[in-house]
Image (tube, helix red, strand yellow):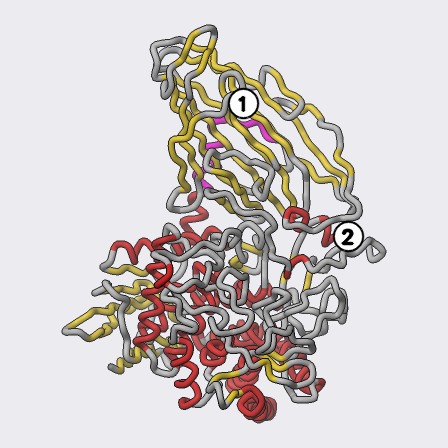
Amino acid sequence: MENQPRLSCDVQEQSPHTEAKRPSLYVLKEGDSFLVTDDFGDITGRSDGLFTDDTRLLSGLGLTIGDNVQPAFLSSTVSRDNVFFTAHLTNPPLTVDGQTLPANALHIERTCFLWQNRLYLRIAIRNYSEYALRLPVGLRFATDFRDIFEIRGARRPLRGSTLAQQPIEQGVALAYQGLDAVRRQTALTFSPQPEALGDGLARFQAPLPPHGHWQLLMEAGRQANIPTAGRFRRGAVEARRKMRQRRRRGAQLTCSQPLFQAWLDKARADLALLTSDLPTGPYPYAGIPWFSTPFGRDAIITALQTLWIDPALAKGVLAYLAGHQAAEASTFRDAQPGKIMHETRKGEMTATNELPFGFYYGGVDTTPLFIMLAGAWYKRTGDEAFISRIWPQLTAAIAWIESRLDASPLGLLDYQRGERSGLANQGWKDSHDSVSHADGRLAEGPIALVEVQGYAWRALLDMASMAARRGEAEPAGRWRERAERLRQTVEQRFWLQERRFYALALDGAGRPCQVEASNAGHLLYVGLPDQQRASQVIRRLLSPAFNTGWGIRTLSGEAARFNPMSYHNGSVWPHDVGLCAAGLARYGERQGTAALLSNLFEAALAFSLRLPELFCGFSRAASEQPIVYPVACQPQSWASGAVFMLLQATLGLEIDADRRRIRVNRPALPDGVDRLTVDDLPLEEGRVSLEFRRVAGRTVAFLQQQDGIDGVTLQFNQ
């Protein structure tokens, strides 16, 4: 399909969402499908719908009663385990069969869930009146089979063909023939059989005796199945069982503060929601609605955030990314041999090469992060067999990094997209205006980001450490020497003496972008700076220029491009705060780390305990609660995982499986939490439990029990 038309627009670096999000949207996810509805349970055809493999299979779904009247709203919720959406509705005053039915005579419960890439819907109506009714009920439906990039604003020169609706047993099939020669279908089936079906509307007559009830079942999926109450129950049981398995993997955290416990539970439930069980193991998809797909960077950081409590997630991420490493060069896909995947998509636009994101490698940081995760996972688990299995991919990844360092005049890891269809900026701040000079001018490439040099430095050291453990002394020594050269270059080229801070980046001419950004906090996370410079960076990150009181901004409030409502130039990203906080903790700043954890917790309270992808970077003094960024993904995997990285940093906890040692260094507990237990912490083939308590103004740690493993020691430093 190489001759298919390609788009010249840079889809991902546009403000990724061109319309304001409605106030209440609810999401479900299972496998490669997700559902976004409004609070009625309706699909409006805006940015909501039923999606599978990056294609919208259902773009409209609306319930009516009586003479085409929308029910009145009571409440709606998603269950705590994120399996079921339920809307409670009632009737406005209606005329039915010549009778006037008063308001609130009917209770309408609308419940849906996803299982095996199918939508299951049940509408149960109970009549609380003294009237016998034959209530007209309608379900309006539509599908447009639009690629998710179209919904995000990409314009296509051509589209495929919408096929005629086909009647099927107890339903209808809607289909579309794409430009990629793939026929996509949505089959809608109903029970009972509709009295009339056509033109996007299924009509029913619900017999409702006084105090009687009636039920409608619907399924939507690629294949047709006749809905039954038994199928609904069995699917619900399996969906809930699978979600429970994901939530219970790894250590369980329990604390004495109910609201903080609720935040931990919500974050864990959201990670379970976003995690798909792939053949290579569990993999956290990035976020809903725009990024419900495997991303490299997002998954690696989520795995790093949760590695201490759930190493199985990191193993699944490493296995998947190792299996999809680039093997050939492509400027269209920004691929070179050894690079680790940035993003994968399954929609029509990537299949026809209108966009490069089928397997896209335009992330400069994903490859060193892949090695960093492997190094951290090896230390956490001691599993030499798995590292040996992916060692060819690790050596290919470090070879790519070294080749880029060799190609750079300054010996740095830089980037520049191969074609205009790729991402202009290829660090985690990948919007088009995220890298600039002090006067606001955008930097020209190739660009070397400061945090990426830190990732590359740490990747070299991790490869050296793993190679040494494997008995490969020569490459281990070479990688250590190269890491030291890179460290010296970073300190010489990026340090801004007058600002006592690191430059955001170097542009293509080697000029420093003298802009203060949170990227420097990632340099602390990997441990590259010495203590003196780290202390200066920490003071700045905790100053009002960065610290909003809800978290750390991506860009100093004094920068020329600062805008607290921007995507990357002054907003607050919870995962970014977590990495910065872990960097503070590495250099002994436990008080600041604990304060950031408390700040994010207080922000989470304003978001119903579900932190979004980002929120606006206004100072806390200017608002009583954090201000919503209206089109942020929610939930987002690395936003959900941020609490666990912050908590680990606050507890000062490190796990070294090789030495069977758990180290707790100068721990602190979050504000308001007097006791926290970590039960069933995986270690080798066994599990251990820890307890942290506040005693006489200090936090102390205890090793509570060991199951299936002996000789674990707790090294406690107050």
SS class, disc 2:
loop
Residue beneath label 1, please? 191
Which mark is drawn over residue 222?
Answer: none
Coordinates of residue 431 in the picture (x, y in percent): 61, 64
* Amino acid type, callout 1: Ser
Residue beneath label 2, please? 352
In the displayed structure, 288 sits above or below 698; it is above
> Which residue is outermost to the top?
98
Coordinates of residue 167 in the picture (x, y in percent): 69, 23
SS class, disc 1:
strand
Q: CA distance from mark 2 to mark 1?
A: 38 Å
**In which quadrant will I find the N terminus?**
bottom right
Picture quadrant where residue 56 is located: top right
Q: How many residues crowd mark 1 within 10 Å: few (<14), some (14–19), many (20+)?
A: some
Going from the N terminus, do you reach mark 2 or mark 1 first?
A: 1
Q: Is residue 160 left or right of residue 306?
A: right
In the displayed structure, 25 sits above or below 628; it is above
For image coordinates 71% across by 26% down, the residue present is 166
Magenta residues span 224-238
Q: Main secondary structure of the magenta part?
A: helix
For image coordinates 50% across by 51% down, the residue present is 630
* Amino acid type, callout 2: Thr
Q: Nearer the viewer, residue 165 or 714?
A: 165
> Which residue is outermost to the right?
3
Q: Is residue 501 magenta?
A: no
Picture quadrant where residue 595 is located: bottom left
